[in-house]
Image: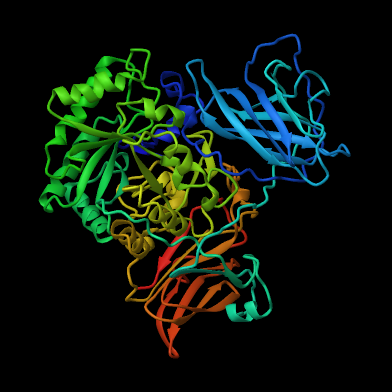
């Protein structure tokens, strides 16, 4: 999500950061921003080893829904499912369903996920699907953690809870009220990985190992090992390319807020580098800092000077840009008008391309988001600028088709799994495309990682999205497979350092404090992969690999490591991650590839094309070597730049990315 940078000495601030700050006034000014990262209904993982909860007192004298309330639930065929209504107290929140088995053991839980909202009264709807253990289920309650407080709904009073027996289905809207309490004992969830990868084999191969002895993939296959957590081949992701004769575009989200010290030359350098990756242009995230329009002007000047083949368009950051009045809408119109006529401005279907980050609840003082039509789209048209509007709205997808001012939607959160599962299990694309009309387009997102680690005394955001199992590769492969119906993809991001999602070089400026997990953690080793997948998306054919390249990435410490000097604390969702060295091999012909992480190593026979490998992490440097005919052809060793450690001083779930020359 977007970041912005304020000039020294004020330091940096990110759009998402402002939403998280405990004292932020933005939450009140822009109701609805609390749903930015809750778009995927996905899968929900079962957790175990949670102690029996302390008795929960509920005020049964009130029938109003104050903070959280189970709206409905059903138990059928081993799955407890339902919906929860809650008040949007803050952006970051967790909703957990806890239940006991038929023996009375409170040992199980699962996470709920955002579905839609907030509505005009500030309420959201979350849903849950909990696979129930073989020991059955007797009763459950819901826990809502937000802003340092915990709220409960247990269905109607002390010790009652929601009752489940056999096949159950009921509406729960009137069965009790919720109050804020703190149980005396409750362990954190330990989520189990339930995602399954299924796809057809093609030129991309996936191999994995968790052994620490030198092992070949053929040895593992001979031993009959088939699980992905051992030395073996696993089912590869889909590598089919959807058929389409339409022009396809690859954009990258560029945070203008992180470019305070940029000159036109810096922009020219970024443009040349991104173009060499196969990227067609930048979506310029424009925030509220007074100096940002000048940087946008420099960007357009650089693109025009380069020949204008590399395009730019505005992504209006509505998490910080005001939208409370007609005057605010007029300011947005002026921003778009300024560069709409530039030869370097991106167009789609002959119209000026414009996007946003958030803004779905903006009404510009009218009481309705339909004001986007009259005060923005129509106002620009009257000024001679016809736009193709593809915003990143985080509102109910079922409303998209009725929003005639939207030519499409950009699904920001489709880049990452929104829970403890692999990206292949995500339903984010289907949820959004299902809400569009036949005339509206869908723009997908791709990202390598997500980790942010700001303390409560600064920006108060400290969590990860699961970025394992070759996320960058797997998401690209899914998008390429969709190219028959998807013509645009946006890489999230080029330079959002505060959230570890950058694929460009580390330069410019970054949010204050984020250097702790960004410095020394380059991501531009992904260049060869970006170029490979961008070509497949734009042409409909995976390119033939003609040169050998090894791309390696690893986190710096185990997920369960205890940092010795970290005041912020372990990030939320840390358990979602795995401790692996990930490698993508681009091989021009069959070869042998040896991976090493600390003292562990494994050797694989790979075929021509792209092969994905992984190896369990251990303390020390990471390396990979590709040999053919007994000669080393490509190699990478991180000894001088990166060491995996079991004893970190601070938590860092960012990844180090290295690549062979």
Residue at 15%, 45% (x, y): give it. 344
User: Where residue 171 sits: x, y (%)?
Assistant: 69, 22
> Going by the image, does 222 lie left or right of 509?
right
**Which quarter of the rendered picture does the N terminus lie within?**
top left
Question: Residue 67's quadrant in the figure?
Answer: top right
User: Where residue 412 sits: x, y (%)?
Assistant: 41, 40
The outermost residue toward the bottom is: 630
- Which residue is more in the foreground, 296 or 542? 542
Residue 329 vertical position relative to residue 357 in the rendered view, above or below: above
Residue 283 vertical position relative to residue 211 in the rendered view, above or below: above
Q: How is the image coloured?
A: rainbow
Residue at 34%, 17% (x, y): give it. 324
Residue at 42%, 50% (x, y): give it. 447
- Which residue is more in the foreground, 190 or 294? 190
Q: Can residue 643 be seen in this view?
A: no
User: Where residue 81 sits: x, y (%)?
Assistant: 67, 34
User: Where residue 271 sits: x, y (%)?
Assistant: 22, 53
């Amino acid at each position: 999500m977007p970041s912005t940078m304020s000039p020294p000495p004020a330091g940096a601030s990110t759009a998402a950061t402002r939403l998280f700050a405990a004292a932020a006034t933005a939450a009140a000014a822009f109701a609805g921003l609390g749903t930015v990262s809750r778009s995927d209904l996905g899968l929900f993982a079962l957790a175990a080893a949670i102690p029996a909860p302390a008795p929960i007192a509920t005020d049964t004298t009130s029938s109003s829904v104050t903070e959280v309330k189970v709206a409905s639930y059903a138990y059928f065929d081993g799955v407890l499912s339902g919906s929860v209504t809650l008040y949007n107290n803050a952006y970051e929140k967790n909703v957990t369903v806890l239940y006991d088995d038929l023996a009375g053991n409170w040992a199980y839980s699962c996470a709920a996920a955002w579905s839609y909202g907030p509505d005009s009264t500030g309420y959201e709807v979350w849903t849950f699907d909990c696979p129930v253990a073989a020991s059955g289920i007797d009763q459950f309650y819901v826990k809502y953690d937000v802003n340092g407080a915990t709220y409960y709904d247990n269905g109607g009073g002390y010790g009652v809870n929601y009752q489940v027996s056999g096949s159950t289905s009921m509406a729960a809207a009137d069965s009790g009220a919720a109050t804020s309490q703190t149980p005396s004992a409750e362990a954190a969830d330990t989520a189990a990985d339930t995602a399954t990868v299924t796809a057809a084999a093609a030129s991309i191969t996936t191999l994995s190992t968790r052994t620490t002895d030198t092992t070949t993939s053929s040895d593992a296959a001979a031993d009959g090992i088939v699980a992905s957590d051992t030395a073996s081949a696993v089912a590869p992701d889909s590598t089919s390319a959807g058929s389409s004769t339409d022009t396809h575009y690859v954009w990258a989200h560029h945070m203008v807020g992180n470019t305070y010290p940029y000159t036109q030359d810096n922009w020219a350098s970024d443009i040349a580098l991104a173009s060499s990756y196969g990227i067609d242009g930048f979506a310029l995230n424009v925030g509220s800092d007074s100096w940002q329009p000048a940087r946008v002007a420099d960007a357009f000047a650089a693109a025009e000077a380069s020949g204008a083949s590399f395009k730019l368009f505005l992504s209006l950051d509505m998490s910080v840009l005001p939208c409370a009045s007609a005057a605010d809408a007029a300011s947005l119109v002026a921003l778009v008008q300024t560069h709409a006529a530039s030869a370097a401005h991106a167009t789609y279907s002959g119209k000026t391309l414009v996007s946003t980050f958030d803004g779905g609840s903006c009404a510009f003082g009218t009481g309705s988001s339909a004001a986007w039509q009259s005060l923005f789209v129509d106002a620009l048209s009257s000024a001679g600028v016809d736009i193709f509007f593809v915003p990143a709205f985080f509102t109910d997808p079922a409303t998209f088709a009725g929003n005639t001012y939207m030519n499409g939607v950009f699904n920001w959160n489709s880049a990452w799994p929104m829970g403890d599962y692999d990206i292949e299990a995500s339903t984010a694309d289907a949820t959004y495309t299902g809400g569009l009309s036949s005339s509206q387009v869908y723009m997908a997102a791709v990202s390598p990682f997500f980790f942010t680690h700001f303390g409560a005394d600064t920006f108060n955001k400290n969590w990860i999205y699961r970025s394992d199992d070759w996320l960058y590769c797997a998401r690209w492969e899914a998008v390429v497979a969709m190219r028959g119906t998807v013509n645009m993809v946006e890489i999230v991001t080029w330079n959002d350092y505060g959230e570890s999602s950058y694929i460009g070089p580390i330069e410019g400026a970054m949010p204050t404090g984020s250097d702790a997990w960004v410095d020394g953690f380059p991501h531009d080793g992904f260049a060869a992969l970006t170029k490979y997948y961008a070509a497949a998306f734009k042409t409909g054919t995976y390119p033939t690999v003609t040169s050998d390249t090894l791309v390696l990435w690893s986190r710096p410490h185990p997920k369960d490591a205890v940092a010795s000097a970290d005041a912020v604390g372990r990030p939320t969702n840390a358990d979602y991650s795995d401790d692996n060295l990930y490698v993508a091999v681009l091989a021009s012909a069959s070869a042998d590839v040896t991976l090493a992480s600390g003292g562990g190593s494994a050797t694989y026979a790979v075929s021509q094309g792209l092969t994905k490998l992984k190896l369990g992490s251990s303390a020390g440097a990471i390396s990979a070597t590709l040999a053919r005919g007994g000669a080393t052809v490509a190699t990478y060793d991180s000894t001088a730049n990166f060491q995996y450690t079991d004893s970190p001083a601070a938590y860092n779930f960012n990844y180090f990315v290295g690549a062979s020359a």
